[in-house]
Structures are given as C-alpha cells and as structure tokens.
Image (cartoon, helix red, strand yellow):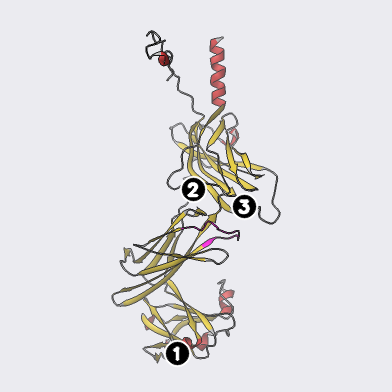
Amino acid sequence: MKKTLLFCLMSLSLSAQAANLLPPGSRDQAPSRLVSAPAPAGEFERKPVAFAWALDPWAELEAPAPFVAESREYWALAEASEMQAGLSIDTTAPGALIRVSPAAGSDAVEPGQLRMLRNGKAIAEPETFARRANAAQLKAAGMEVPDGSAIVQLAPEQGKGRFQVQLAEAKGRYLVHVFEPNSEYVLKAQAGRRSVLAGDTLEVSADLANGTSKMAGGEVGGSLISPSGRSYDLAFRNGKAQIQVPDEAGTTPGLWEVHLSSASFDQGASIQRDARTAVEVTRPTARLGGGYRFDAAAVRFELPVQVAAAGRYELRGTLFATGADGVARPVAQAHAANWFEPGARQLSLAFGRGNVPSGFGAPYELRFVELKDQARMGTLETRELAVRGAGATPTPRAVRPRDAAAPGRGTAGRETSIR
C-alpha cells in the first residue's frame, strides 16, 4: 500500500511540475512595470492559435546579436548656390561614387550635367568619370533611388582627396551622397539591443576604424528618431552614448532609427562617415508572470502572463532535450497566441511528445523564450534560458529520525527534518 502510494505521488510529480522561471540574464529583456494602452485600430484575430514543429538536434542555435552597421559613406545637403559653385567632397580612396538627388521642388538631375573640379579647376571631361547613370537606369538595375537622381563614379586614375562636384543649372536644394567602396575607413554603429522597452535605457556604440585598427579622437554625433519623425539627441563619450527611451514611445508603428555622423582626420586626410541602424521600441503592455507549470506527459509548458492592455499576445520558445551523452540539444519549437483583456492570463507552449526524437528526453530546458505584443508589433520579454531541469526525476529526500531531545529546550522545530 505504501509503495503504491509513493509510486502515485512520484508519477504525479513527474507528469506535472510547478516552479519559477530562471531570473533574466544580462542579455534578456524583462519589463519592470506595465502600462495600459488603448487597443490599436484595425481588425485582429481573436481566436487562440498554437503550433509546434521538430528541429534538427544537431543544428547550433543562438540568440541573434544586434545588427552592426558598417559605413563607407556620408551625405550632405546642399543649396543651389553651393552646387553652382562646386560643393566640396572628401574622398579617401579612388573610385568614389557620387549621387545627387533633388529635394522636393527641385529639378531632376542628369549625369551629363555634373562636372568635377579639383582645386577649383575643372577636370577634363573624358578623364572624369568611369561610369554614369540616371534614375531610370538605376531603377532598371534594381536600385531604389529618388526620382530625378543621377550617379557618377570617379575614374580610378583621379585618385583620392578633395574634389568639388558642380551642377551649374542647380535650383533649390540637393542631397549629395558619397560612397567609397574601396576605402579602408569604416564607421561601425551598433545599438546595444535589438529591442528595448519604452522608459528603459538604450546604449549605442560608434567606432571609426582604418582597416582593423580603431581610430582615436574625432567627433561623433547622432540622434534617435521615432517612426513619427521625432528626434532625440545622442551625446557620445568614448564612442558610446546612452539615452532613456522616451516613455511616450507613441503608437506609430515601425522601427526607431539611429542616425550617426563622424568626422576625423588621418594623415592629413578628412574622413566623413554617416551610419544608420534601427531598434525596436515597445511599450510594456504585458509580461510573464514569473512561474510555470510543466506537463511531462504532453511536453507542455504553461506560463502565466500579466496583461495591462487589451491586445493579441504571442509566446515563442525552443525545447532542449537531453541526449544519451547528457548534452541538451534543440529538438522542437512552439508558438502560441491569443487575444487577451487586461488581467492574469496564460499561454502554453505545447511541444508534443511526437516532436521529441528517439534517444532524447528529460531533463528538458526551455530556451529563447519571447513574449510579443502582436497588435502593437513589439517584443515585450525575452529569456535566452527560462527553465532548466524540467521533467527530471526528483532526488529522493532523506527523513531523519525524530530528535530524542526533550521538548521545551528549543528543539521542538527539529523533531522531524526533511532535506
């Protein structure tokens, strides 16, 4: 009778376990607070959806790192008078590409209208450019450019240094883009995270390098620009800038852009670079509840979700199972989504026993968990490692004999101890 009862209790503990998620790691994102927000306009699916599929256990998985933008280019906004006289541009390698695009209200530019000067003197026409193209030709080649643009490439024999690009018939304003595909000078820009919550701190780094060598000094400036067009200054020090993302992140969908500019000198050469990267900003409308329940028979994790704003929320996760060699490897991925009103809710990642390959099993790990606000298109919470040891056989716990000490001597709390 005792053995049967013990077996039943152990079976129940193995088939259903409840515990807390592991604390967020340094690269994880977890809301410290929640905010209410109106439901976005539009039609959204209200029915729950859940699915899972098997993975190759031998494939390596890792969380994607934030994108690193590498720039060998810069932009300049020029008035008609500057273009008529010749706008100065600096190049650090032969073969620079120069694109001139008209601003709103300005006339289209044709390649044949552009002239290059050096030290204020025109360069002979046949020796100036290696190639030229107008907007129609560029679009036919699959390049997206503003209407009315023209692009020219300096002939390699013209070398590098300072030139002036001239448009004698200029009227209005123009955007001049200089791209140096052969240059060793590269500005690298990176946001510290792929996504950030409104109200949290975002770090941005910027490094100008000559080949593999970082360059000291120089000036770096930039701004964080919302999808609605609002701009927030970035103040750099030692190549890094931090900004508290505005709490009023807004409801305009789209990525926030980071715009950076650098200016430096090296061996008498003027170096200009502009770079852009993007970051996802999300208002913290929901978060994981902190606990979970694991059903070993169904290989299913049930996670509570605290919801502060009505919307459709999605949970993603990857199941790692242990092989015969004792190593946990990715075997399945699951997604689940549902429309929730504010309150205590729950989403389940049902991986299914059929998606666990032969030779793999408990203990399981739950990795690469993401909670997303589908209605507002944002990432709310991430965990590279959320659960370790799920479904493992519990270690037998020893029961010590009753303490023989007489009661009333401060030993009553030690009469029966379970470790």
Determine which residue is flagged by label 1: 85
The amino acid type of the residue labelled 2 equals Gln
Q: Tell me what residue is drawn at x 43 percent, y 72 percent.
A: 73
365 inside magenta stretch? no
Q: Residues within 10 Å of mark 2 (few under 14, many from 20)?
A: many
Which tag, 3 or 2, sits closer to the chain's start? Answer: 2
For the residue labelled by badge 3, is the local secondary structure a helix, a strand or a loop? loop
Q: Would you say 207 lies left or right of 152 here? A: left
- Quarter of the image with the N terminus in it: top right
The correct choice, above or below, for 1 with respect to 74 in the image is above
- Give the labeled residue for mark 2: 29
**322 lies above or below 265:** above
Query: Can residue 13 be seen from the camera position used here?
Result: yes
- Look at mark 3 in the image and give the residue it sits on: 37
The picture places residue 319, in percent across and down from the top left corner, at 53, 38
Tell me which amino acid carries mark 3. Answer: Ala
**Region in magenta:** 244-256
